[in-house]
């Protein structure tokens, strides 16, 4: 198999930096799966706050934008999310952890009707169910 | 609402760029030494965040014109790219549950897009 540049670069000798955790874990830790799942809840809250913020401006122009608390809170949550995601990615496979992010669709779809003029319908319920089954399948498959 | 071709290309580009963002985050995460502060010093994590931001700007630009029914599923193709990159760059195994699970997620996203009409 031909080595890709990124794989070569990630060996300690090539980068010259000390590598503490190795990328070649056999399993994805439950802690990582839990952390990414938490990310999806926070990410959904961030999306809802940002949508609320952009549809309810605090005032005109730039001042309204930088004093818009929901918008600021939304961005802050995205920051928290990135830190949590990186912590999760340290101990697990990207191909297992990244698809879990799709649960964000599930929370946003379920929570939106509570905050906006929005409603669930059979398409959305079907979509939510399929995503939950798909994510579960990937999660369970990673433990075998 | 008809979705212009340019919006579709933009969203596809956004999903592609975002998938490289997550590869850079994973590569940075693999090399982190303990402690939160080491995160700030990693250019790989910085690059990952930059690519994420870039992809979200492209995405927001794209969804101004176009229907979420078409654009939502295109965004979720990012999961497919990421599956390939995790195999290529990190030697992670493909298995049946990953491919089938991802397929179900994609179909689910198509349904949510349809429900948002």
Image (cartoon, coloured by chain):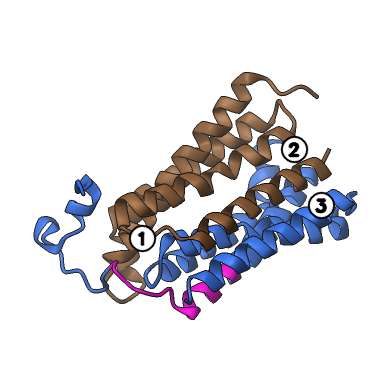
Q: Viewed as shown, does residue B47 lie left or right of A70?
A: left
Which quarter of the figure is the N terminus of chain B placed in? top right
Q: Are marks 3 and 2 in contact (CB under 8 Å)?
A: no
Q: What whole-number distance in Å separates the C-alpha atoms at marks 1 and 2?
A: 50 Å
Residue farthest toward the front in the current orientation of the protein: B96
Closer to viewer: mark 1 or mark 2: 1
Q: Chain of mark 2?
A: A
Residue that carries the numbered disc 2 in the rendered image: A60
Mark 3 vs 2, N-terminal side? 2
Q: CA distance from mark 1 to mark 3?
A: 32 Å
**Which residue is the site of mark 3?**
A124
The segment highlighted magenta reads A23-37
Q: Residue at x 52, y 73 (%)?
A: A33
Q: Which residue is mark 1?
A: B92
Q: Few, some or many C-alpha atoms within 10 Å of disc 3 (few <14, some 14-19, many ≥20)?
A: many
Residue A49 visible in image: no
**In front: A34, or A69?**
A34
* Chain A shade in the render: blue
Chain shown brown: that is B
Q: CA distance from mark 3 to mark 2?
A: 35 Å
Say which quarter of the image contains residue A103.
Answer: bottom right
Task: Indicate which label's residue lies in the foreground, 1 or 3.
Answer: 1
């Amino acid at each position: 198999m031909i080595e890709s540049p990124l794989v070569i670069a990630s060996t300690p000798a090539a980068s010259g930096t000390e590598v503490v955790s190795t990328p070649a874990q056999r399993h994805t830790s439950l802690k990582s799966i839990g952390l990414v799942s938490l990310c999806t809840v926070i990410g959904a809250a961030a999306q809802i706050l940002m949508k609320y913020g952009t549809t309810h401006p605090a005032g005109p122009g730039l001042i309204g934008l930088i004093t818009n608390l929901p918008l600021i809170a939304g961005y802050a949550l995205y920051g928290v999310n990135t830190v949590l995601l990186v912590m999760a990615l340290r101990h697990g496979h990207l191909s297992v952890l990244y698809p879990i992010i799709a649960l964000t669709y599930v929370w946003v779809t379920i929570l939106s009707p509570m905050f906006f003029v929005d409603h669930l319908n059979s398409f959305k319920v079907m979509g939510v169910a399929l995503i939950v089954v798909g994510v579960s399948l990937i999660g369970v498959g990673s433990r075998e | 609402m008809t979705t212009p071709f340019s919006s579709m290309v933009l969203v596809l580009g956004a999903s592609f760029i975002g998938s490289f963002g997550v590869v850079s985050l994973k590569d940075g995460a693999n090399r982190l030494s303990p402690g939160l502060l080491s995160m700030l010093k990693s250019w790989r994590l910085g690059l990952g965040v930059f690519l994420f931001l870039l992809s979200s700007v492209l995405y927001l630009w794209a969804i101004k014109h176009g229907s979420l029914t078409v654009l939502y599923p295109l965004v979720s193709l990012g999961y497919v790219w990421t599956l390939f990159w995790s195999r290529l760059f990190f030697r992670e195994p493909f298995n049946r549950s990953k491919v089938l699970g991802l397929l179900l997620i994609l179909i689910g996203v198509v349904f949510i897009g349809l429900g948002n009409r």
